[in-house]
Image (cartoon, rainbow, N blue to C red):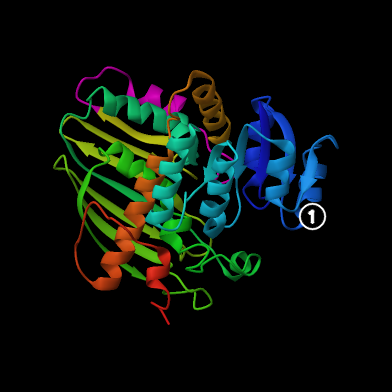
Amino acid sequence: MKYALIGCGRISPNHIMAVKNNRLEFTALCDINPANIEEKMAKFDIPNSVNQYTDYHEMLEKEKPQLVAIATESGKHAAIALDCIEAGCNLIIEKPIALSLHDADAIIARAKEKGVKVCACHQNRFNKSIQKIREAVDKERFGQLFYGTAHIRWNRGYEYYSRAKWRGTWEQDGGALMNQCIHNIDLLRWMMGDEIVEVVGMTDRLNHDYIAAEDLGIALIKFANGSYGIIEGTTDIYPQNLEETLYLFGSKGTVKAGGHSVNVIEEWRFADFLDDPEEVKAKFHENPPNVYGFGHTPLYADVIEAIEKDRPPLVDALAGRRALELVLAIYKSAAEERVVKFPLVDCSTMDFKGRFI
């Protein structure tokens, strides 16, 4: 399967390794900065047969890839995705899928019309720990789900933002919730049943006066199945990343996943005693070298199978929209100081430009 990567920045190594691990036919790399391409070519021993481009339109026309991954600035995801869809390409889009619900809906609709698969790159769904927890949800081992919580307690300082001026802007990124927290937000919504009734949120910029968006977000969620959710995410933790955790509490089960990127099951208690908690915790305990985890390779494998078998990817474009919708709803609730009802019809990060000035 012919593959091309658009965007050779911070997250691109995970995509390159997933390509190698899944033995895709790597045809092209594209980045507006040729130095980024050259650095990745050298670092990952990519052969010269992989063509290099600074214009993705030219790349699409000449290479005609079957699968394209988009790993650019978040604000460029939608426009590039729609161009790729028009070219008949299947897609893996880094999170968030877009920065507005209008653009996310356009991606979903056009992909359906063109008959191509679109995956939102929420790779933590493929963590072994998360797959184990999801299996327990599907088997109803929790009984009645009461509530779940997602905590992202990370650090991002001036150096991180100065290396890429688009970070922390409303035009190209958003703040802590949209960038650093959206993976765990996706997991919480997925685990708790997806459908939401209402959200109330608070956001603030406490420690990063050099960015436009928030560095702290807190939210309460009421799900349609009667359960609740709590989100707490920040990039203000001193002096470095502390943890990313996901808790689920039900009438017959309690689970906690932690570690760098919810790769470690730390608590496993169920009334049915179908497995030994200590054995589960020992088996599902893998801390990756960074917060990006090990999920890209299995996510790619799932997309390849989805294309070959003509089925939706596990994390399809609608799943990407749901994560985006929840973050935007928190932003809207915080900005307007009110409860936000679902579904959210249209909203964009640009609606909140100037909020903390």
Q: Position of residue 65 (x, y in %)?
A: 67, 34
Residue 244 shows up from this direction: no
Residue 138 point in image, percent of width and height: 28, 25
Note whether residue 159 is visible: yes
Which residues, given as a range, are shown in magenta?
Answer: 270-293
Q: Where is residue 257? Give x, y as percent.
A: 38, 39
Q: Could you classify mark 1 by the number of other residues whose Cα lies within 10 Å: few (under 14), some (14-19), or many (20 or more)? A: some
Total count of labels: 1
Magenta span includes 289: yes
Residue 19 drawn at (x, y percent): 66, 32
The residue carrying mark 1 is 34
The residue under the point 39% across, 48% down is 105
Task: State whether residue 230 is above or below residue 122.
Answer: below
Circle 1 SS class = helix
Q: Is residue 254 left or right of residue 53?
A: left
State which quarter of the image contains the N terminus.
Answer: top right
State yes or no: residue 192 in magenta.
no
Residue at image x 26%, y 65%? Answer: 333
> Which residue is situated farthest in the bottom direction here?
357
Q: Quick check: 286 left or right of 231?
A: right
Main SS of the magenta part reads: loop
The residue closer to the viewer here, 79 or 17, is: 79
Q: Amino acid at mark 1?
A: Pro
User: Residue at position x 48%, y 57% from top?
Assistant: 179
Q: Quadrant of residue 217?
A: bottom left
Where is 44 relative to 33, above or below? above
Quarter placement of the C terminus: bottom left
Q: Is residue 24 left or right of residue 285?
A: right
Towards the viewer: 204 or 120: 120
Who's the residue at 46% across and 29% down the image? 128
User: In the current view of this chain or complex, which residue is farthest to the right?
Assistant: 48
